[in-house]
Amino acid sequence: MSPNLLLAFLPTFFFVSITPGMCMTLSMTLGMTIGVRRTLWMMAGELIGVALVAIAAAVGVAAVMLHYPLLFKVVKYAGGAYLLYLGVQMWRAKGKLAMTLDGNKPAASRRQLASQGFVTAIANPKGWAFMISLLPPFIDASRALGSQLTMLVGIILCTEFSCLMLYAAGGKSLGRVLGRGNNLMLLNRIAGTLMMGVGLWLALG
């Protein structure tokens, strides 16, 4: 990959990734309620989704997908409805993601957390459109596509993971402040509201 293009891509994608969005809000919300360590499973699913979107955008599949919005509508409405349901449960201090004083509450499975991240990443039409507009200018047509794409996707995933970790850690810190005694209900309602917001954002965005 051209060094000049690489140096331009690094700060560009960092500022794009660090900007609050669906996945970052989800990471912060889960960091508040289940901690950074368990949120890593959501991140794993999200990163797989981001990688698929980036690769598809680079090879032109995303351009075709965006011409068939019905496919996106089905996926994003279903994903948005699920996140909205989880948000309502958290707001009511119910469900597997809500915080309670009772440590015997069953926790969300790793698969459920990973699925949340994956669906949120691939069901966002704006994410697809962004990758289509961002990646092509940083690909040098005179060089091998495979090696360039590998480097770009690697940078994207490392940057995205770092930003997800920052948001999850920030959410955990906020959770520690609010998660004491009478503040527990407030924490669940804040987290539930954020989760519902992500669900509406995904479904209506």
Image (tube, helix red, strand yellow):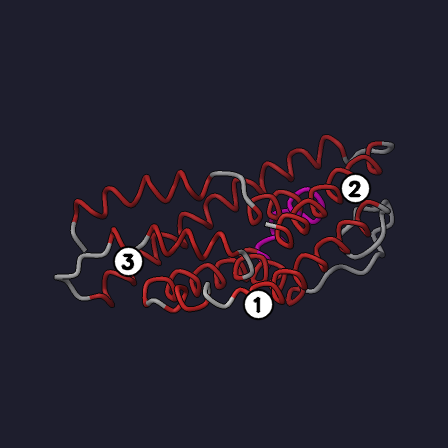
Look at the numbered disc 3 and give the secondary structure of its residue: helix
Of the image marks 1 and 2, the number of the one nearer the N terminus: 1
Q: Residue 151: which disc?
A: 3
Q: Report x, y in % for residue 92.
A: 86, 47
Query: At 40% from the left edge and 38% from the top edge, which residue is drawn?
Result: 15
Q: Report x, y in % for residue 4.
A: 17, 44
Is 95 left, or right, of 152 in this rendering? right
Q: Nearer the viewer, residue 205 or 127?
A: 205
Query: At 64% from the left edge and 45% from the top edge, which residue is drawn?
Result: 31
Is 79 left, or right, of 65 in this rendering? right
**Mark 3 neighbour density, 10 Å: few (under 14) some (14–19) many (20 or more):** few
Q: Residue 70: which disc?
A: 1
Look at the numbered disc 1 and give the secondary structure of its residue: helix
Magenta includes 160? Answer: no
User: Which stretch did the figure color magenta?
Assistant: 30-42
Q: Report x, y in % for residue 127.
A: 47, 53
Q: Nearer the viewer, residue 32 or 142?
A: 142
**Mark 2 neighbour density, 10 Å: few (under 14) some (14–19) many (20 or more):** many
